[in-house]
Image (cartoon, grey):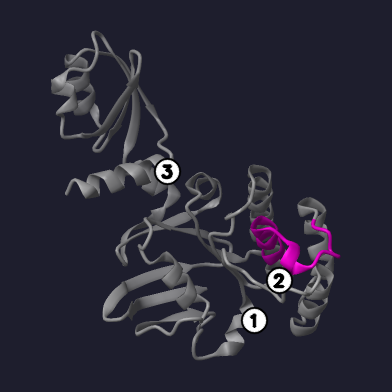
Amino acid sequence: MIEIKDLWKGYNKSEVLKGINLNVSPGEIHGLIGENSAGKTTLIKCAVGIYKPDKGEVLINGSAVYDNPSVKEYIGYVADYSEYIPFYSISKMVDMYSVFYPKFNREKFNDYNEIFKLDVNTRIRALSKGQKMRLAFMLEVAKEPDYLILDEPTSGLDPVAKASFFEMLINEVEQREIGVLISSHNLEGLERICDSVTMLHQGVVDRQMSMEDMKCELTQLNVVFEGGAGQNVRSMPEILKISNVGSIYTLVVKDFNEDLVEKLKKNGASLIEPVDISLEDLFIVLEEERSRG
């Protein structure tokens, strides 16, 4: 298990992480989301042992990551700036990984490269950012770690490659019961794969729950109003966001219940249809609500 306990980290007298607590179990995909500068990358770097916590600890399988370098053999780490020896070819990098990581599975690397289709004779310096991300993922997964810790792993990937990446990740979790901590602005992708999510805001945990519980926090409604939505509707405190295309209005509401349904009907609603809110829409609405104070 990855255990992050009361983690604090700061730079130049500014606290970036403030008492973070987070667990990732084997077989779980845990998403890390938040606005820019929320502390996601700092948390990831503490989790893989690059940064030393100012207070608190990160444990993997019960051992502190920063104080026990050998623990890193259980981790596969991919960041959006992954760099390798520029004059090496991909095949040379695979050879090097095979030497340094005894569990390195060359067959798995080759299987995944059948999908990503990188020419193994290409030198690293000739790869695009997206190709480097594909290479980094394949190398780290082929190490067969217990945990994958990923920071913006779909950065630079085209839509087809992103879809393949998420399929590969789900396959690894299903086949080997690995734990995954993944930070990404690709909220649509995270929604597809994550079991649970932590939302960071200014270095603290704002929300932390299962995907199902988080999506139940707010409700999206498709509503048809006879004569349009008047000011009475727009001023209802339960309604956090309202928009429309023609006569169909989309409402994001909190505390969805029969009382709210009756209030909407009294104000001309002829059709009220609850629909699942996306993680991206949920995040945007919560950020907008926070900015309004």
Q: Which residue lies furthest to the bottom in this view?
A: 67
What are the residue bounds of the magenta stretch? 118-136
Q: Is residue 257 left or right of residue 22?
A: left
Q: Which quadrant of the structure image shows residue 12? A: bottom left
Circle 2 is placed at which residue position? 144
- Distance between mark 1 and mark 3 Cα atoms: 34 Å
Task: Tell me which numbered mark, 1 or 3, is placed earlier along the sequence.
Answer: 1
Marks 3,2: beta carbons within 8 A = no
Query: In the displayed structure, would residue 41 be above or below residue 65?
Result: above
Q: Is residue 247 left or right of residue 172?
A: left
Foreground: 214 or 112? 112
| Residue lying at 74% horizontally and 81% vertically, measured from the top left | 101
Q: Is mark 2 on a helix, strand or loop?
A: loop
User: Residue 167, percent across and down?
Assistant: 67, 50
- Find out whether residue 130 is within the magenta segment: yes
Marks 1,2: beta carbons within 8 A = no
Q: Is mark 1 on a helix, strand or loop?
A: helix
Select label 3 or label 2 by which is in front.
3
- Distance between mark 1 and mark 2 Cα atoms: 9 Å
User: Residue 290, percent across and down?
Assistant: 23, 49
Circle 1 is placed at which residue position? 73
Circle 3 is placed at which residue position? 280
| Residue lying at 26% horizontally and 81% vertically, measured from the top left | 13
| Residue lying at 64% horizontally and 71% vertically, measured from the top left | 83
- Find out whether residue 141 is within the magenta segment: no
| Residue lying at 54% horizontally and 47% vertically, measured from the top left | 189
Task: Tell me which numbered mark, 1 or 2, is placed earlier along the sequence.
Answer: 1
